[in-house]
Amino acid sequence: MNYLTVENISKAYGERVLFENLSFGINKDQKIAFVAKNGTGKTSILNIVAGLDTPDSGQVISRKGIHIAYLAQESNFDVNLTVEETIFSTENNILPIIHQYEKALQNPNDSENYQKAFELMERHNAWDFETQYKQILSKLKLNDLHQKVSSLSGGQKKRLSLAIILINKPDLLILDEPTNHLDLEMIEWLEDFFKKEKITLFMVTHDRYFLERVCNEIIELDNGQLYKYKGNYSYYLQNKEERKELEAVNLGKAKSLYKKELDWMRRQPKARTTKSKSRIDDFYEIKERANQRRKEHEVQLEINMERLGSKIVELHKLKKSFGDKKILDGFDYVFKRGERIGIIGKNGTGKSSFLNMLTGGIALDGGKIVVGETVKFGYYTQKGIVIKEGQRVIDVVREFGDYIPLAKGRKISAGQLLERFLFSRKKQHDFVEKLSGGEQKRLYLCSVLIQNPNFLILDEPTNDLDVVTLNVLENFLLDYPGNLIVVSHDRYFMDKIVDSLFVFRGNGVIENFPGNYSDFRAYEDSKEVDNSLNIKPETNENTQEVKKQKGKLSYNEKREFGQLEVDIEKLQKKKTEIEKQFLNCEINTEDINDKSLELQKIIEDLNTKEERWLELSMKQE
């Protein structure tokens, strides 16, 4: 059953054309993700489909009687209402019945009023609805229903919008970055909710695990053309590569044919027969196909990082509370060179506050932070770029100089650097406030990286970045030799770039977990399985001895085992790099002795760690 049809829509702002003649349909039970680069009009398309904007040409036709809901980036509520009043003010027949029943419960002496409310709940079968409604509010951490909307944070307002939409169960749900402002626990719950519920979705999201697990179709806008893929994110990636390879083959054939026809045209045939005129007409079509180019520009990230010294950052007995809320309670940690740490935890456990303390933005209640002399922080905050009125894109970069130093003593102009970040010469003179959310994030990322930090701190860097830019950022960070701390709810991103985690449990408790997010999730799930079995420990001494010899690893041993795998992989990579340098004669004669000693040390460390890894792996069998 077709819910909605988009026919030949176009949109432009002045001379800037976002898209032209786009057509697609949305059918019942489809879960569609819309994928495109930043600045190509994703949010504009969502607004048009939702009926909040009109196209310059074309039309959107929706099935009569279907209920469409839109989760936008920004929420628009009456700030004078409470959370509960906002929820009950929506157009839903069941919610007033639940509200009447809950009010009747508050006055048990009025039995007549209670009976009426009870009968209404029975008649409309509102019990299941009430259960799900309360579950949605609980999962999205909207527990204080009497809180005024005016006192809610931006993230809380986004969660309130999402809760209202889920409670009202629309036929078609349009979502613009639904996972922004949700913690990992909420995102995983939302994934399960969408997988179980028969609801039709049309969404823009950068969360690739969310795409993988929820969507069954992907529509991509690429170089002005729409491409449709009937499958999840993995299917899309595979088939996109096949499409690009086919396009390259066809382009090669077109160029070959064009050369042949161009030779014929140059001979200037005198006999203008019908056949030759037809061939001349075909020539111009072949020429257009042969001259087509894919705009495969990618963000090029390159920095001139100062080498880190032996002392990086040391945290000694850190303490911090906000009123009764404890964030840090005697936290100790000494950062090693090249560590890549992800930070996870529920909203409100102090992740961003910890980063601000690390960079001196928030004062500690106790303890001290010692920063090495060579450390240069690069801090990408959630607030994003500070927009100055009348400031153009080029001005943002020129604040750091007309020429920017790169690696190996090279330098490029501010304009050339912006081109590497996909800002064309024309775009560089646009006002910053006119950029899309994703373009502003990309510009902000550029302004952080060109300062050449050797200790990068990224607070939700993936919000509003398109999938293309995300992939490039990931590849850059994989090769980044400095220290890295990332707060992100993007599990795909975290899995790819971090080696260990700080898990913020709340109430000042922070655990250091060796491994990425998927490792942590598997570990947490295994703990839940163990707890659900509820096996009582044996008291027999022989049984205890067997358990000591062949039982599961202790918590500390599991952490050690995970860290050993990370260390072994790093050492093997270093060993391979040095061996390649010897094989390719890339080492100076003076450095041969030093490199030989370094290689010997790596091999010794590798042998020691592999022996310990084998010992622990045999113990857990």
Image (cartoon, helix red, strand yellow):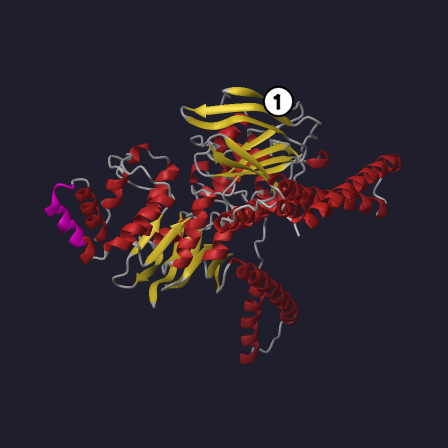
Task: Tell me if I can see residue 23 in this picture.
Answer: yes
Pick whichever, 374 or 270, lies toward us: 374
What number of labels is visible? Answer: 1
Query: What residue is at 46 percent from the left and 61 percent from the top?
Result: 217
Determine if the magenta segment contains residue 203. Answer: no
Q: Position of residue 5 (x, y in %)?
A: 35, 63
Which quadrant of the view contains residue 186?
top left
Pick whichever, 54 or 457, lies toward us: 457
Query: What residue is at 31 percent from the left and 37 percent from the top?
Result: 144
Q: Specify whether 261 is left or right of 600.
A: left
Which quadrant of the view contains residue 145?
top left
Task: Tell me if I can see residue 401 in this picture.
Answer: no
Q: Specify whether 434 is left or right of 117.
A: right
- The secondary structure that dominates the magenta segment is helix
* Residue type beneath disc 1: Val
Pick whichever, 49 or 482, lies toward us: 482
- What is the secondary structure assignment of the residue under circle 1? strand
Residue with the mark numbered 1: 370
Pick whichever, 107 or 80, lies toward us: 107
Q: Position of residue 194 (x, y in %)?
A: 40, 55
